[in-house]
Amino acid sequence: MLFESSKVRLRKMTKEDTELYHKWRNDIAVMQFTNPSLDVYPIEATKEFVDTVILNSPHSKSYIIMEKDNEIPIGIVSLIHMDYKNRNAECIIDIGEKEYWGQGYGSEGLKLLLDFAFYEMNLHRVSLKVFSFNDRAIRLYNRIGFQEERKSRQSLFRNGDWHDIIHMGLLQKEYFETQITST
């Protein structure tokens, strides 16, 4: 079923999710793996970001990842920078509740988003960016079929060291092929 797997369900993000997103956005342990500019945001800044970038942009779609058994919101997955003419988008994922890390919730949430992107929206290409030190995410993206396209060398300064940002992409045809071989 669309937007639902064995472990998670995706639901459209709403204004009521702002405080929860604010908690995740200000958790350095969560954001160190996905946000290039670590900072602490006031609630007003998060409200503005949610209103303008997440909820009211025609170029993004964001979904809360719900742990299915207990209906607990555990993260967010989004398509951003959607280019309808060229059928491209970038995806992002954050599991904000750390006790759900490493248990397959992110993998299932991302696959649901990609199913929607490729089967329903008929996108041709989905891209993402990942920090070179995020080994767990890189393994996941490779397993799903994303391919490294380039690196922005030493463009992220984190914990006293320079790190690359890896740009990866997945074409609709490639995704369909991985779905056939994994069933």
Image (cartoon, rainbow, N blue to C red):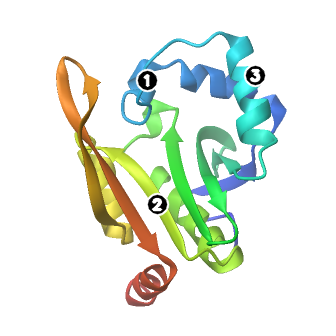
Mark 1 secondary-structure assignment: loop
Find out whether the residues at labels 1 and 2 contact each other: C-beta distance under 8 Å: no
Q: Give the quadrant of the C terminus.
A: bottom left
Q: Is residue 163 left or right of residue 126?
A: left
Residue annotated with mark 1:
37
Q: Nearer the viewer, mark 3 or mark 1?
A: 1
Q: Residue furthest left?
A: 161
Residue annotated with mark 2:
127
Height in image: 169 above or below 163?
Answer: below
Give the residue at x 18% y 17%.
160
Distance of label 1 from label 2 (alpha carbons): 20 Å
Q: Nearer the viewer, mark 3 or mark 2?
A: 2
Give the residue at x 35% y 54%.
167
Q: Give the quadrant of the N terminus.
A: bottom right
**What is the x, y in percent for residue 110?**
52, 58
Residue 9 appears in the rendering:
yes
Q: Quadrant of residue 117?
A: bottom right
Q: Which mark is residue 47?
A: 3
Give the residue at x 82% y 30%.
16
Q: Is residue 71 left or right of residue 171?
A: right
Height in image: 129 above or below 53?
Answer: below
Tag 3: residue type? Lys
Tag 1: residue type? Ser
**What is the x, y in percent for residue 180?**
44, 90
Q: Quadrant of residue 149?
A: bottom left
Q: Nearer the viewer, residue 126 or 74?
A: 126
